[in-house]
Image (cartoon, rainbow, N blue to C red):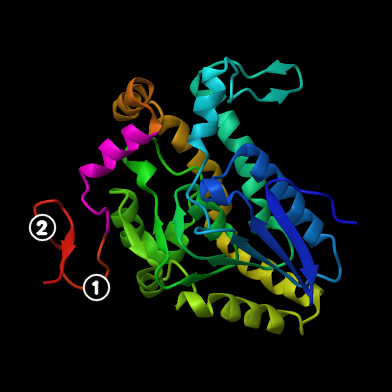
């Protein structure tokens, strides 16, 4: 029997499990509680022999706008340590680089279920798929996006590196660098061009497209789906994908020590998160990259047609 969830919606039927991130008022920002529920639901689906695949999507106007930084800020204001993690032998109170990496790796294990589980996962992306939202989308087996969805990792400008790194395996090293070194964003239609997503379709056809693919998976023996998913994932592992995820967490811990990261965190303390993010992104105009054609910008840094 399915358990009750607070931050996701879990439904099964017609050979699939649908998992909906359900914090629409926060644009499905990824709190640790939500990630824990997601991890539990994914294993629940993997354990259900009637489920052939999982559809992962978001409620409201976005797939996910990233990790819930407000949750951490509120916890500190209330005198709680949001980064406290328990393990045998004591707590992780420290602020050493190893403490940071330990915490990042613990959170990463929850996300890696998308990669490790036997059933295929389709990420159904609309609206914002930003920062941490890309971490869970790109660990899915296929991403089908609305053509006007927005993909990017703006926190790479100031908060560190990526705690997961599947970009290079999807869109290649040059586009991974172009987007991650600037934090610029692209649309779903542009993400299809560079291979970051499998396909982009008009938003009003997105659900139909995803459900249609799930219908086809439902005709295949789940054990065969698992064998073929795992064959491809083993090839990715032979190309270093699993090791790269562990190294991504370690690299993020290193990047958290950058002077620019320290300055941004101080700006958050002085002005609050929303004001700090607004000031950061103002320097980048509309924050967009252009996949096809020259990037010509106006005085405010917004892309204009050549």
Q: Position of residue 48 (x, y in %)?
A: 85, 64
Question: Is residue 10 shown above or below 212?
Answer: above
Does residue 11 appear in this view? yes
Q: Quadrant of the N terminus?
A: bottom right
Q: Earlier in the sequence, mark 1 or mark 2?
A: 1
- Residue 117 against residue 154 in the figure, above or below: below
Q: Residue at x 69, y 60 (%)?
A: 19
Residue 286 locus on image (x, y percent): 24, 54
Q: Is residue 101 left or right of residue 157?
A: right
- Where is mark 2, residue-wise? 298
Secondary structure beneath disc 2? loop
Compared with residue 184, is residue 77 higher up or lower down, i.e. above or below?
Answer: above
Find residue 181 and report its horizontal and vertical position in percent: 30, 48
Query: Along the horizontal axis of the image, is 197 left or right of 32?
Result: left
Residue 292: mark: 1
Tag of residue 237: none
Disc 2 packing (10 Å; few <14; some 14–19; many ≥20): few
**Is residue 277 within the magenta segment?**
yes
């Amino acid at each position: 029997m399915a358990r009750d969830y607070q931050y996701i919606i879990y439904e099964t039927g017609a050979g699939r499990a649908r998992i909906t991130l359900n914090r629409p008022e926060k644009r499905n920002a990824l709190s640790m509680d939500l990630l824990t529920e997601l991890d539990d639901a994914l294993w629940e689906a993997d354990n259900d022999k009637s489920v052939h695949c999982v559809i992962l999507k978001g409620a409201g106007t976005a797939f996910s706008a990233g990790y819930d930084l407000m949750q951490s800020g509120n916890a500190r204001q209330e005198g709680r340590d949001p980064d406290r993690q328990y393990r045998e032998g004591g707590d992780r109170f420290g602020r050493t680089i190893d403490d940071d990496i330990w915490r990042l790796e613990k959170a990463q294990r929850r996300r890696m279920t998308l990669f490790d589980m036997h059933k295929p996962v389709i990420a159904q992306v609309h609206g914002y798929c930003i920062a941490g939202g890309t971490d869970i989308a790109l660990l899915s087996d296929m991403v089908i996006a609305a053509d006007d969805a927005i993909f990017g990792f703006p926190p790479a400008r100031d908060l560190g590196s990526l705690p997961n790194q599947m970009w290079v395996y999807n869109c290649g090293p040059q586009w991974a660098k172009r987007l991650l070194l600037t934090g610029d964003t692209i649309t779903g239609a542009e993400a299809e061009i560079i291979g970051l997503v499998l396909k982009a379709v008009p938003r009003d056809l997105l659900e139909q497209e995803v459900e249609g693919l799930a219908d086809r998976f439902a005709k295949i023996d789940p054990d065969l789906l698992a064998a073929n998913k795992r064959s491809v994932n083993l090839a990715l592992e032979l190309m270093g994908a699993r090791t790269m995820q562990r190294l991504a967490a370690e690299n993020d811990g290193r990047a958290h020590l950058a002077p620019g990261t320290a300055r941004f965190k101080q700006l958050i303390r002085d002005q609050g998160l929303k004001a700090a993010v607004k000031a950061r992104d103002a320097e980048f105009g509309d924050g967009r990259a252009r996949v096809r054609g020259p990037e010509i910008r106006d005085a405010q840094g917004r892309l204009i047609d050549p």
